[in-house]
Amino acid sequence: MSKAHLFNTLDGLVPKALRGLITYNPRLSLDASNRVVFDPAHPPSQVSIISGGGSGHEPAWSGYVGSNLLAASVAGDVFASPSTKQILAAVEAVPSDKGTLLVITNYTGDCLHFGLAAEKTKAKGRECKMLICGDDVSIGKRGGALVGRRGLAAQIGVLKVLGAAAAEGLGVEELFELGTEVTKQIVSIAATLDHCHVPGRTEHGALGENEVEIGTGPHNEPGYRKLSPQPSAEGLVKEILRYLMDEADPERGYVHFEEGDETVLMVSNFGGMSNLELGGLVDEVLNQLEEDWKIEPVRVYAGCLETSLNAPAFSVSVVNVSAVARESGGKFGVEKILGYFDLRTDTAWEGFAGAQSGVNSAKERRKRKEQVVQPPVETRRPVDDAKDLKVDPAVLEKMIRTACEAINAAEPDLTRWDTIMGDGDCGLTLQTGALALLEAVDKHGLAAKGSVVEVLTELEDIVESKMGGTLGGILGIFFVSMRTALEANIGLAKEQGPLAVWSKALSSALVHLRTYTPAKVGDRTVMDTLIPFADALQEGKDFKGGVEAAVAGAERTKQLRPRLGRATYVGLGVSDDAKELPPDPGAWGAMVAIKALEEALH
C-alpha cells in the first residue's frame, strides 16, 4: 500500500475535507468546530436521523446528509469516535418535534459517546433512541457473544431505509423497530489485499506479498483469516459467499434464505480499488450468488459506500428483504422496504442507486443475461481468387508462425519500453494480435489455402476486434489499405513478380495512413519502421534490403525524442543529457515481425 499522500499530516484535514464536501449541496450547513454537517431545512415534523463516527470513511457519513436520508452527521478524528459534545451539537442543529434516532455502527467508542448523548437528550425531556448496527459475520457468534457483530458498510443501507421511513412520518419507536429488523437480516464480510495508510503516521501494518485477508475491519483491524497464496478473484468470492450464505455454519449462519427471497446486494469499495476491478467484482458476486446460492438481488448498490482511506479492500453485504417482512409479521412488507430504498435523495447515495427505483420484485427486474446482448453475426466477404496472391501454404504458415512467435517473445521488452515512454500497452496489444493470428492458423487452417488476401482479411478482423489503442488504429488502417491495394494491383504479380505487388500495396497503404496521422520518419513512431521498409522496396531493393531498412529505422528511434502521442508528454521527463532512449516499442515491434518474415523464407 502506498504511503504517498497529498496531505502528509492530519492536522486540520477533517474540517477542511468537510468544507470541501458540503459544496455538492449548497443547502447544507457545517458546524466546523463540532464537525457537524446538517440540513437546516430538515422538517421538525419528522424524526431526525443522525449518524456518524470516525473520519476516513467518506462519504460516510457527511455525504449522506440531505432529503430523505440523514438530518445530520458528526465526524470524529480519523478512525476515532466523535465526542459526546459534538454529537449533542448535531442533535441541537436539527431539532425535531417527533424525536431523534441516533444510528451507529457497533464500535465501542461510538456506542459510549452516542449512548451518553442519547441519555443527555432524554434527560432534557426529548424523545431519543440509539440504534446499533452490526452486520459483519467474520467474528462469529462465539467471538461476538458479548459485543455483537461489528458494523460494516451495510449500515448505509439501514440509514437509507430509515431516512425514507422518517420522511413518510414514522415515529422514533417504529423507526427503531424497523432498523432493528433490517439489521438482523444482513450478512456482511470484508476482504483486503493490504491495509490502509493513515497520513502522517509512520507505523503501517502491511500484509505479506501474495496474501489476502478475510474479515478485515474498516479501521485496519486484523481479519479473521489470511489466505496465502492469494486466491483468484473467483476463488476469493466463493470463499466470501460461503461465509455469508452457508446457514449450516454454526458460527456464521445469521440469516435464513428461502428460494425466491428478494434481496439487496451492497458492495463497498474501501477506497483503494479501481472502478474497473469493482465492476468485475460485482459481476462475479452476482454470478456466484445466482449459480451457487439461487439468489438474484433485486437491488445492487456498489461503490465507495463506506471507505477506509486508501485501502485496496472491499465488503460484500446481502440484505434479505423478504426475511425482514417475514420476521416482522408483515408489518414491514417487501414492496414497502424496497420503496424506502428507492426514494430519491439529494446525497451521495444517488451515485450508487442509478436507475433501479420502481422495480418492485425479482419478476419485474430485467434479467442480467437479457442486458448483455450478442453482437450481430458477421459474414466475411469471400475471397476473389482472381484478385488473390497465392503462395505455398507451408511457406505462408511458417512465415506467420515465425513472425507471431517473435512478437510474443519480444512482448516483455516492448511493454517495459512503453511503460517508460508511454502508457505500457504496446507489447500486450501486439501480443494479443499475434496470439489471435496463431489461433486462426492452428484452429481454422488459415494458411491452408496459401491465400495472402485471406490472411490480410483475418488480420483486419483481429486488429478491429481485439487490438485497441493508437497502434491498433494505425495497423487497422494499414492492413485494410494494403489488402485493398493488393487486390487492385494483383496484375503486377504476374507481370513483375510478387515483390512488385507488395511494394505497390505497401506504398499505397502508407499514403492512406498519412490521411489519418501526421507521423513520419523521425517522429519516433511505428512509421519509422514502415516507411523505410516500403521505400526500400519502391527503390527496387529485394525483401532482405527492405528488412535492413526497417531494422535501421527501428534502431534509429533510440536517438529520437518523441513528437507524437502520449510519449510526447512522458518523454519530457527524460533528461536531454541522456545519450540513448529505449527504442520506440511500436517501431521495434513492427521491425521484429518484418525481420521474422524474412528469416522464415530461409
Image: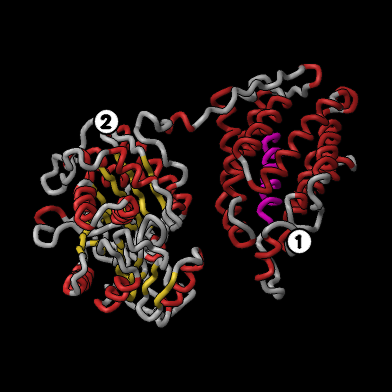
Q: Position of residue 281 (x, y in %)?
A: 39, 46
* Amino acid type, residue under disc 1 in the picture: Arg
Judge by depth and name the residue closer to the eye, 594 or 144: 144
Crowding at dot 1, Cα within 10 Å, few <14 / some 14-19 / many 20+, comes out as some
The residue to which callout 2 is attached is 260
Horizontal side of residue 188 vs 250, given as left or right = right
Q: Is residue 551 left or right of residue 356?
A: right
Q: Was residue 381 drawn as part of the magenta stretch in this picture?
A: no
**Element marked by disc 1:** loop
Task: Sort mark 2 into few (<14), some (14-19) or many (20+) by Cα contacts within 10 Å.
Answer: few
In the rendered image, the vertical position of residue 103 relative to residue 513, given as above or below: below
Q: Quadrant of residue 273?
A: bottom left
Q: Tell me: 152 left or right of 490.
A: left
State if disc 2 and disc 1 touch (CB < 8 Å).
Answer: no
What quarter of the picture does the N terminus occupy?
A: bottom left
Residue 488 percent coordinates (x, y): 85, 26
Q: Residue at x 79, y 39 (%)?
A: 543
* Relative vertical location of residue 588 with respect to residue 452 in this rendering, above or below: below
Q: Which mark is residue 563?
A: 1
> Does residue 596 belong to the magenta stretch?
yes
Residue 84 image offset from top left, x and y in percent: 24, 76
Q: Is residue 346 left or right of residue 92?
A: right
Q: Which residues are magenta?
A: 584-602
Of residue 282 and residue 91, the one placed in the foreground of this image is 91
Residue occupying image coordinates x 69% and y 25%: 454
Sequence-wise, the earlier of marks 1 and 2 is 2
Residue at 48%, 50% (x, y): give it: 276
Q: Nearer the viewer, mark 1 or mark 2?
A: 2
Q: Main secondary structure of the magenta part?
A: helix
